[in-house]
Amino acid sequence: MLIARFSVVLALVALLGGCASIVKSATQNLANNLSQAILNQNDTATVRDGAPSYLIMVDSFIASSPDDVSLLRAGSALYSAYASAFVEDQPRRQRLAQKAHDYAQRAFCLELESLCAVEKIKLDRLQQELANVQTGQHPVMYDFARAWAGWIEANSDDWNALAQVPRLQALFARSVLLDEGYDHGGAHLYLGVLASQIPPALGGKPEVARAHFEQAIALSAGNNRMASVLYAEHYARLVFDQELHDRLLRQVLEPAEPVPGLVLINALARERAASLLEESPEYF
């Protein structure tokens, strides 16, 4: 499918900032500590098992403050992260991805009213409207694009959902122009995956995807190892480059000092890298 389950990995970064917003009215220290605890947790099962409690918690906070943009963004990030990374049941994933999308869209509409009907705006006009998005509005736009990507992935058997991909690409393209380093180069990762869905023989442009993946790796200084996993999975496999594929994945599995804020993401990356590397002889 065109948007593999990496959407959550990127969402996990934003989740931590979002958690701080969730409970800021009660205790900022608790929020900050919770955020750091999640980001720096190296046991993915612990996060998987503990996250559902916070899904209910975020719903309760949003119910009390339905127009709080920070809460909506945090709720979207949490639902996206949990659905994409830990939920295998497809109908359940669709429900959770829908809630993540709805929360993000509510925040998006509050901050960028002229783009609220983005899913219906013609592409040429959308690109004109996106040119007016300013740096201060960028985080909300990016959050919506990320949640939208997760929703499309969860509904990949629906052609109406897939038809929204060009609009989604337009949002990420604008994100790159506004701040390409945001979310550890996350927009480049999304654009890389999107550009690697069509084989070269059918008119695809894999080198465009390669450029996005390499830029994402550079922007994170190689610290976000999920970028290398996605590079291997979506580009190297597309062009049948086993040498690149295996080299990238072995690099991910090499021991490294923990990077604050990326411990959990890199733990997920190592799990995926090990699985892909094991499959390599059969795939190639």
Image (cartoon, rainbow, N blue to C red):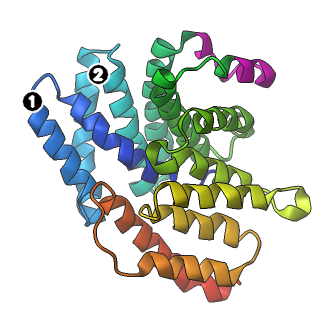
Q: Residues within 10 Å of mark 2 (few under 14, many from 20)?
A: some
- What amino acid is at disc 2? Ile
Instruction: Identify the residue at image location x=62%, y=51%.
Output: 3
Between the C-alphas of marks 1 and 2, the distance is: 17 Å
Q: Can you tell which quarter of the image residue 133 is in? A: top right
Chain-order first, disc 1 or disc 2: 1
Return the residue nearer the eye: 173 or 85: 173
**Secondary structure state at the residue bearing disc 1:** loop
Numbered range of the magenta stretch:
114-128
Asked whether residue 41 is in view, the answer is: yes
Q: Residue 74, percent across and down? A: 33, 33
Q: Is residue 5 visible?
A: no
- Residue most toward the top? 114
User: 253 left or right of 245?
Assistant: left
Quarter of the figure with the N terminus: bottom right
**Disc 1 residue crowd, few under 14, some 14–19, many 20+, Cα 10 Å:** few
